[in-house]
Structures are given as C-alpha cells and as structure tokens.
C-alpha cells in the first residue's frame, strides 16, 4: 500500500474495512476455527495499526495481517475444544440443500488439506495474492507455493467435482 | 472444476464469515500495543528473571531431527515485584505478558468494557515511565519520593488517562496508570500510596521448561484460568517451536481424539499421582490432566520433547 498522504487513521480505517473479511476468511480457511480466527485477526489488525507507518508501506499489507494472525494462534487445544462444541451442535441439525451441501463438502475438503496447502489456497483465493506475494507472506519459496497450490487444486477437484455445476 | 471455479465457489462458501469488530475498536487495541511498546523500549526490567538451573539432559534424541536434544530446566514464571494493597473494591487482578513485558491489570471483571480499558495498570521499569502524549506533566510527592504525574486527554475518546511514576527502589521505577474514576490526580496518587513491595505472581505456576525457551505470551482467562505460550524463538518466527499450557477452571472431561486435528494413540499417564491422558499426534503431544475437582490443564507440545518430558512439565503446573 502506498502512502496516499491521507490522514493515517482514515487510511487505516479504509484498509481495515476493505480487507477485514477477506483476511478473516483466509485465516479460517487456513484451518483456524472461527472464534480463534476472529481474535487473531483483530489482534493482527491492532498490531498493524500500532506499526502503521511500516505496515502501510508493505507491498501486501493484508498478507502481513494474515501472517501475523496465523502466527498468533493461541492454542490448538482451545480449537479442539471448540470443535467439540461445534460437533455437538452440528449433530442436532443440519439439513443442507444440495448447493449448501456441495459448498460444505468443499469447505471440508479445504479443511482436510495439509496446513501449508490450506494457507496457500487461502492467500491465493481470499487475498488474491500472486505466487511471489504468497511466497513472501508464508516465507517459503515461490516454487513451493506453486507445488502446494497444484496439489491442493488437484485434491479439491477430485473431492468436489460437482460443485461448479451446483453453484453456477 | 478449474481454478476460477474453486475461487468463486470458495468465496461464496465463506461469504457469511465476517469480522464484526469496528475499526475504532481495533485501533484502540493497537494504541494499547503502541503504548506498551514505548514502555518496552524503556527497557522494562521489573520482571523477575527466568531461573535456569540445568537438571541434566532428559532427551537423548530429537524425534523431528532437531539439532539439539531438549533439556528441561527449573523454571519460574515472571512475577511483578510490586502489587496493589488494598485492591480497590470491585476490581480483580489479571495479567498480560507480551513482547517481554508484564503488566498487571486491576479491572472490574463484570465490566466487559473495563477489560478493554483497565481501570488500573501496574508496571515495574528500570527507568521512569514517560508519556509523550500527555497533555500535562507535573512533579508530585509519592511514597516519600518525588515522582512524575502525567495526565492525558485521549482525542476522540471518553476515557482520560493518568500515570504516576516514581523510583520505588534504587534502580527500579514503578508506573501506575489509571483510567475512568482513577484518571484524576487525586485518585491516582491515592492508589499510588497503596503500591507495596509484595511480589505479585501470575495465577499459574510452572516448575519446568525447555532450556533456552522463553515465555512469549500469558493471558488470564476469566474466571481464574490462564493460557501461557513458550517458544524457542520470537512470536513472528514461523520456524520457532512452541508449547502452550492452558489452565481451565472447568471439570476435566478427558480427551476426545477424533476431534483433534491430528489424532493419534491415547494412553493414560500418571502426573504426580493424578491420572490424565496423553495423545501422540502426528505433529505434537496433547496432554490433559485434572488439577483438582474443578480445574484441569491441557498442554500442547512439539514432539521434540519426549513423552517423559511432557509428563514432567505437566506435573510442574499448578494454580496459584
């Protein structure tokens, strides 16, 4: 993000409003439960504001937020306990229509990907990062990003081949 | 399905996931971090140091091929060298440890807003605190010393801020900050007279830790619980190893492996005479064990630690 000469608080607010949901979705899709992700992403934005002169000059500040949020995860224990509660809730419901069921399958397929593949998919899809930016955000080589993305897409296509039709 | 299909479908699938915090809320949280960093830059040194007394090598190999086997050493969590006595009515103490600085917050536990903006916060420093954003600064008498009082009106915010700082012991300064009803000169100076040299420990005790690892985070989970994180690297270091210990003020329910991210075999373990469960996941250890009838701990550790080390560490966890 370039320095626009705008009031920093206004600049940050605009950045926050335009990216917050995408960043949260990226962190959730990376494998963090939503409650933990909300806290981690809010914390990451707080850190972004605390270091705004630096973060605003970052080539992909939203990627910076996601990376900080991913590093800020609190505890897989808490996530697991949350999942228990979610499962208990889920068992009492849920009759999805076919479109929702296919989307649900895709979400589950993403959740089942290895961690790095999930992160690459999340950054590429929700933040629209290119390979180079994804590489920088995750601290891995561009070739590794490409490989992870290829494997992930292969898996997703095989797991949810009908999603395209039902969602189009 | 091509990549664009996946992109579109996933975007739709996650469309109901939205962050509800306002920008103003996040910025207030960021302002707190910024103030804390200023305090940290003042070379915060009021926290009792880690005592690292080698107990000898416990691990002989590193399952994930780490360069060095992990040794457990005697460990003490940091404590604030001062505390508030008496604590104002209605306030409970909690802690925040981040970026190597410990702050005690005295807040109204029933007031969610107060948890965001603590009524009183207490720090120990190796030099006098400063507040560059103060709207006024004055010398004051506090505990028989000459101290500095900073008063601040936060632009656009309802809560004012008062900080008093003084040299409590040679080389050790204290900073007490008040908001709300404690943001006046009279109120903050009254509370400053109640600061004692009684050490204020965190609400969880840890007797052992991997050598060279450090506390990177500690938060109180109301009511009475806590989560701590230790690491052999900085919090932003993705390659650093981490472990977490959570003190739960809830009855022990045992492990449910199928709900874990990487479930593995579960075995019962004896932790200082208490029966818990240990799961060996693909990427780490999961241990859960009761402390008493109403509390239990959970611990997540990398597989660089041995099973014996995980159990030994868990045995050294207690509630204060």
Image (cartoon, coloured by chain):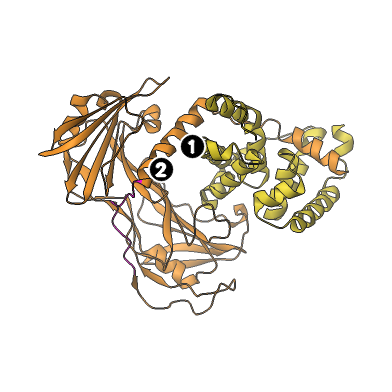
Residue at numbered disc 2: B37
- Figure chain in yellow: A
Image quadrant containing the N terminus of chain B = top right
In contact (CB < 8 Å): disc 2 and disc 1: yes
Q: Residue B314's quadrant in the figure?
A: bottom left
| Closer-to-camera residue (A97/B112) | B112
Cα distance, mark 2 to mark 1? 9 Å
- Tell me the element at label 1: helix
- Tell me the element at label 2: helix
The residue at the point 21 percent across, 51 percent down is: B171
In this view, the residue farthest toward the front is A5
Q: Position of residue A96 (x, y in %)?
A: 75, 34
What residue range appears in magenta? Answer: B42-52
Q: Is residue B16 left or right of residue B139?
A: right
Q: Residue A126's quadrant in the figure?
A: top right
Q: Is residue B181 left or right of residue B308?
A: left
Q: Position of residue B217 (x, y in %)?
A: 43, 50
The residue at the point 77 percent across, 43 percent down is: A105
Q: Are marks 2 and 1 on the same chain?
A: no
| Relative to A108, residue A148 above or below | below
| Number of numbered discs on residues | 2
Q: Is residue B147 left or right of residue A100?
A: left
| Closer-to-camera residue (B309/B252) | B309
Q: Chain of mark 1?
A: A
- Figure chain in orange: B
Q: Is residue B46 visible?
A: yes
Residue at numbered disc 1: A50
Q: Is residue B47 left or right of residue B309?
A: left
């Amino acid at each position: 993000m370039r320095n626009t000469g705008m009031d920093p608080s206004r600049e940050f607010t605009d950045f926050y409003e335009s990216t917050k949901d995408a960043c949260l979705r990226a962190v959730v899709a990376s494998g963090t439960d939503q409650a933990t992700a909300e806290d981690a992403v809010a914390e990451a934005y707080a850190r972004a504001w605390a270091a705004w002169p630096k973060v605003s000059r970052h080539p992909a500040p939203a990627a910076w937020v996601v990376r900080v949020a991913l590093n800020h995860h609190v505890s897989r224990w808490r996530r697991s306990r949350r999942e228990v509660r979610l499962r208990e809730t889920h068992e009492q419901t849920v009759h999805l229509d076919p479109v929702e069921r296919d989307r649900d399958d895709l979400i589950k397929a993403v959740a089942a990907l290895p961690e790095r593949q999930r992160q690459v998919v999340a950054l590429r899809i929700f933040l629209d990062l290119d390979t180079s930016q994804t590489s920088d955000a995750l601290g891995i080589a561009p070739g590794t990003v490409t490989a992870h993305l290829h494997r992930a897409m292969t898996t997703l296509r095989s797991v949810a081949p009908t999603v395209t039709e039902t969602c189009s | 399905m091509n990549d664009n299909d996946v992109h579109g479908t996933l975007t739709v699938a996650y469309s109901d996931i939205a962050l509800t915090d306002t920008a103003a809320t996040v910025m207030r949280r960021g302002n707190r971090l910024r103030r804390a960093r200023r305090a940290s830059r003042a070379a915060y040194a009021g926290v009792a140091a880690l005592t690292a007394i080698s107990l000898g090598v416990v691990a002989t190999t590193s399952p994930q091929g780490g360069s060095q086997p992990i040794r457990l050493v005697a460990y003490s969590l940091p404590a604030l060298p001062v505390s508030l006595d008496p604590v104002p009515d209605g306030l409970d103490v909690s802690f925040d440890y981040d970026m190597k600085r410990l702050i005690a917050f005295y807040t109204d536990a029933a007031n969610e807003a107060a948890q965001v903006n603590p009524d009183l916060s207490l720090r120990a420093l190796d030099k006098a605190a400063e507040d560059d954003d103060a709207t006024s600064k004055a010398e004051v008498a506090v505990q028989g010393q000459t101290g500095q009082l900073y008063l601040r009106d936060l632009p656009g915010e309802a809560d004012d801020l008062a900080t008093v700082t003084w040299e409590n012991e040679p080389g050790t300064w204290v900073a007490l900050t008040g908001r709300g009803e404690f943001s006046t000169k009279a109120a903050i100076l009254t509370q400053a007279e109640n600061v004692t040299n009684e050490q204020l420990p965190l609400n969880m005790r840890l007797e052992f830790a991997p050598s060279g690892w450090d506390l990177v985070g500690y938060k109180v989970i109301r009511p009475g619980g806590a989560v701590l994180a230790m690491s052999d690297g900085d919090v932003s270091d993705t390659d650093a190893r981490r472990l977490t210990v959570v003190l739960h003020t809830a009855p022990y329910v045992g492990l449910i492996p199928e709900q874990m991210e990487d479930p593995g075999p579960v075995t019962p373990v004896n932790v200082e005479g208490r029966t818990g469960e240990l799961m060996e996941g693909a990427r780490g250890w999961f241990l859960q064990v009761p402390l008493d009838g109403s509390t239990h701990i959970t611990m997540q550790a990398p597989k660089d630690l041995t099973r014996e080390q995980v159990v030994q560490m868990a045995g050294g966890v207690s509630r204060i």
